[in-house]
Amino acid sequence: MNDFLPAIELQTGPQPDYSVIWLHGLGADGNDFAPIIPELGLGTSPAVRFVFPHAPHMPVTWNNGLVMRSWYDIHSLDEGRRHADEAGIRESREAIRRLITRENERGVPTSRIVLAGFSQGGAMAYVAGVTHPEPLAGIVALSTYIPSPELLALEKSNANRHTPVFAAHGTEDPVVPLQLGVAARDTLVGLDYPVEWHTYRMPHSVSLEEIQDIGAWFRARFAQ
């Protein structure tokens, strides 16, 4: 893996005060969520830099070994869980941490950075956010799950115990069942994380209502 993951970058204005690192789902790439920025209703002040990195290509066991962009290998869906490659999770977490450090070097402190993600990207947002050694501005986890509860329990960081979390899921999701999203929410609530939970009548996707809710949540974070 290179020093920095390749990424698409978009800004709502010059000299950004905040950054959002947004992680795509399995088999997608950084282009997936770039089009939603105008729908978030953020305006130009404070300016926000959106970073949409591309995951590396790798064979995915669950998908018959097909090579695709993935944050880690998924071994199986046995018993409704995502059995994930913990070494791959850690490697991607380090790549995300390098992106956070680069934002720091460009003048955005960690306390003004949000980690966001959808599906497998949301799983990485959970892991990278909860275990990050410095406080973040927030975590957004969409249609997702916790890929390694053991890693999260072992390495959770006190620095992010009060970091606000926006978590959402579709009630008709056939890819990541709603109960996995609920289990992730309950895990964080049990650890006293401030979770704002939403459900939407949709499959494994996003909706305009959800995007508008995320925009309102962003505006609350960026006003602080």
Image (cartoon, grey):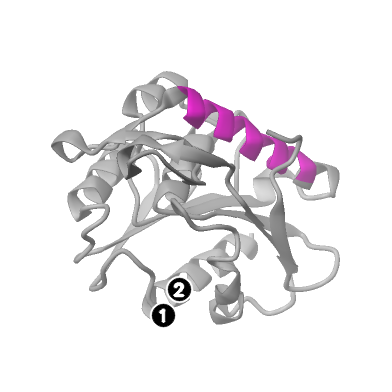
Near-viewer residue (102 or 72) = 72
Provide residue 170's location: percent of width, then percent of height.
26, 65
Q: Quadrant of the C terminus?
A: bottom right
Vertical placement of residue 33 versus 181, above or below: below
Provide residue 176's location: percent of width, then percent of height.
26, 52
Residue 77, by quadrant, is top left
**Residue 116 circle label:** none
100 sits left or right of 115 in the view: right
Vertical placement of residue 25 versus 85, above or below: below
Near-viewer residue (2 or 41) = 2
Vertical placement of residue 131 versus 12, above or below: above
Provide residue 217's location: percent of width, then percent of height.
49, 66
Residue at 19%, 66% (x, y): give it. Answer: 172
Residue 93, by quadrant, is top right
CB atoms at circles 1 and 2 under 8 Å apart?
yes
Q: CA distance from mark 1 to mark 2?
A: 5 Å
**Residue 211 circle label:** 2
Provide residue 218's location: percent of width, then percent of height.
55, 65
The residue pinned by badge 1 equals: 208
In magenta, the rendered stretch is 87-102
